[in-house]
Every structure is written in C-alpha cells, then in structure tokens.
Image (cartoon, helix red, strand yellow):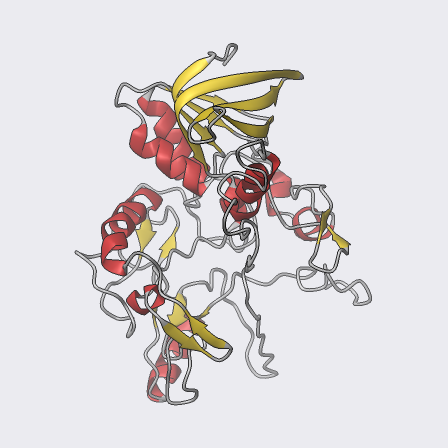
Amino acid sequence: MSTIKDFYDVVIIGAGVGGGAMANQLAGRGRSILMIERGPRLPREADNWSVDAVFHTKKYATKETWRDRDGKDFNPSTYYYVGGNSKFFGAATLRFRAEDFEDLIHEDGLAPAWPVSYAQFAPYYDIAERLMGTHGTAGMDPTEPPRSGPMPYPAIGHEPEIAIFDKKLREKGLRPFPLPIAIDYHQGGSCIRCRTCDGFACKLGAKGDAEVRLVNPALAKGDIDLITETFVHRILTDPSGKRVTGVEITHKGEKRTIAADLFISSAGAINSSALLLRSANGAHKNGIGNNTSDQLGRNYMAHNNTAMMAISPFRKNRVTFQKSLAINDYYLANSEKPYPLGNVQGLGKLQGGMLTANARWRPNG
C-alpha cells in the first residue's frame, strides 16, 4: 500500500497469531482496519530449510539484545515477520485442558484458577482449529476436554517406525494419541511431509502459520491495510487516561500518529508488555494497565521443555516427519507423581548441526 489514513475503525498492533486471528474475524464487515507489523514478509527461499541459516547464523531471528532477570545480555529467539513467531513454530495445536483453567496443584505450589473457564474458551478453540487447519483424531487423548465435534481434518498418520513406537507404548499401558497438527496435508494440500517443518519456516507455505492461515485470508476479505517494517513507539490516551486515542509509529522513516476507535495490542506477551510500559504518561505513571498491580511484564514464563533423544545401534531412524504422536498420561496428577508433569510429543526431524548450534565446543554432524 502507498498511503496510510489518519483514522481507522480498528488498529491491530502485530500480525502474528493474535493479530491475524483478530483481523480474520473482523475483516469483511465494513470496518476500516489497519494492521501494523514490525517486520517484513519472510521471503520464501532456500535458506528457509537450511540448518546453518536457521540454527547457526540465526539469519531470521531478531538481532536485538535483551537482558535477563540478572541483567545479562542475550539474543532472543524471536522473529519479526508477518506471521510472527508462528513462521517457525512446530505446528502443534493442542488445546489447554479444562483443569488448566481451574486451581491446579503443581510441584512448586498452587497455580490459581483463571477468571474464565474452559467452557467459555471452547467455541473459540473450535474456530481456531478450523482457521489453522488442524489435523487430528478426537477422543483418543485421555485428558481431552469436551469439544463440539471432530477436528477439521483427520490425523496425518504415523510413519512405520512411529507406528511401532505407538504399539509398544500401548503394550506398556500408556495411551498415545495423534498429535493435533496444523499442516496442509490433505487432498489438494501443498505439504510434502518434509524434514524441515518444526523450527523452520515453510518455503511452500504448507504450514498453518499465521501469515498463511490468518493474515492472507483476512486481506483477501478487504477493508484491511497492512503496513510492515513499522515500529509502534507508544499508545496515546486522552488526559484522563481512560480512553486510548492513537498510536505513535515510525513508518518508512516518518514518525506519525494514527487514531482509531478501537486498538488491539497483539505484539506477543513480551512486546505488548514493553509497548504498554513505553506508553507511560501522567495518568499511567507505571505504564498503561499497570497503575495498581505493577505486574505488567512480570512473571513471564517461556516455552519450558526438554528434548530427549535415544540412540540405537540396531535400528536406523528412517522417519522423515516424526511429529505425529503425543502422550498425555502424565499431563495431570498421575500414578508416577501426585502433580502434573506435562505433555510428551514427538519433535521435528533432527538433522546434523541442529543440536550443536548452541554448543559451540561440539563438532557439527
């Protein structure tokens, strides 16, 4: 687009999963909408599937420097593109369990209940699975919460080695199930079930990321202007602080203010918090939405996981797309521990150099 209007009905900050979903549902209803994305469109190119480019040189990750809780500098694995971090996600689209919204005892103490229940979220999970194109089989996950019907597409199926693994787990009394996954792997789809999905961008556009499944369809409905490589400095309010009146941006080297009736901050947990903190003013001295709690941006939890790899001298792993199976037998309190242990699921295909990218002393291969 060549021009930006001074006023819109809706301004959406961020073109990732949150912003893309909002745009998708609001578009085509006669409202003028502006989507603001900090990064560009991610090019579809050979390096999308390069271990060296993605994991070693980190070609696509932001070059920003952040500080951890101890004040130590680090470079985050964060991506600024249309589609956001979902351009590199593993495409798994599991729902939270009903118990996750309630008081839940963990090893470290009580996780207090959300102010909303799973039942209130369930209809939106239905919509999200349709939008993202989720494949899976309902009813096999032992902790699965209530749902209104089947998943949009059938499970993608296991390759032979994973099918054997599934069988052996069942023989041990466990209840593995097909991992719900958002890839374009059905009649007429473009997915080739390759080894460069989890952790990589898809140069075929076959992964259910936010650009492919949410933003592009929203733009096709009309009424939306998308501007990229645009930084939002702050949110502006009226003198009372009770009404947001505009956003201050820099676009193509020009600093300007955009007004709207409705503003949606969907820049991710960290950057939305940073934006609200940058927006401190006379009415919001500690940042917008932070006057009483002072908790804005605190208590953030990253994607906490552990990868386990087994090596067999007797069998070669010939699996190409192994991210098809999951186990939730230990998700809640279980026979092994009286507290939740989480979800177990297959990781994407490991290739030489992926695990050594963050261990410089190890040889590649």
Left or right: residue 340 versus residue 272 is left
215 vs 267, left or right, is left
Looking at this view, is 134 or 144 the one in front? 144
Name the residue located 82 percent from the left edge and 66 percent from the top edge. 361
- Residue 321 percent location from the top left of the image: 47, 60
The answer to which of 299 and 200 lies nearer the viewer is 299
- Can residue 342 be seen at all in this image of the molecule? no
Q: Is residue 80 above or below residue 244?
A: below
Picture quarter containing residue 64?
Answer: top right
- Quadrant position of residue 217: top left
For the point 69% across and 59% down, which residue is it? 69
Q: Position of residue 291 (x, y in %)?
A: 52, 44
The picture quadrant where one finds residue 365 is bottom right
25 vs 248: above or below: below
Q: Is residue 242 left or right of residue 252?
A: left
Image x and y of residue 84, in percent: 52, 40
Q: Residue at x 76, y 65 (%)?
A: 359
Vertical comparison of 45 with 269: above or below: above
Please identify the residue farthest to the right as the structure is shown: 361
Which residue is found at the position 66% from the left and 60% from the top?
A: 354
Q: Position of residue 85 (x, y in %)?
A: 53, 45
Q: Nearer the viewer, residue 24 or 58?
A: 24
Q: Nearer the viewer, residue 242 or 46?
A: 242
Q: Is residue 162 visible?
A: yes
- Up-down relation of residue 170 to residue 70 (above or below): below
Instruction: Tally the numbered discs.
Output: 0
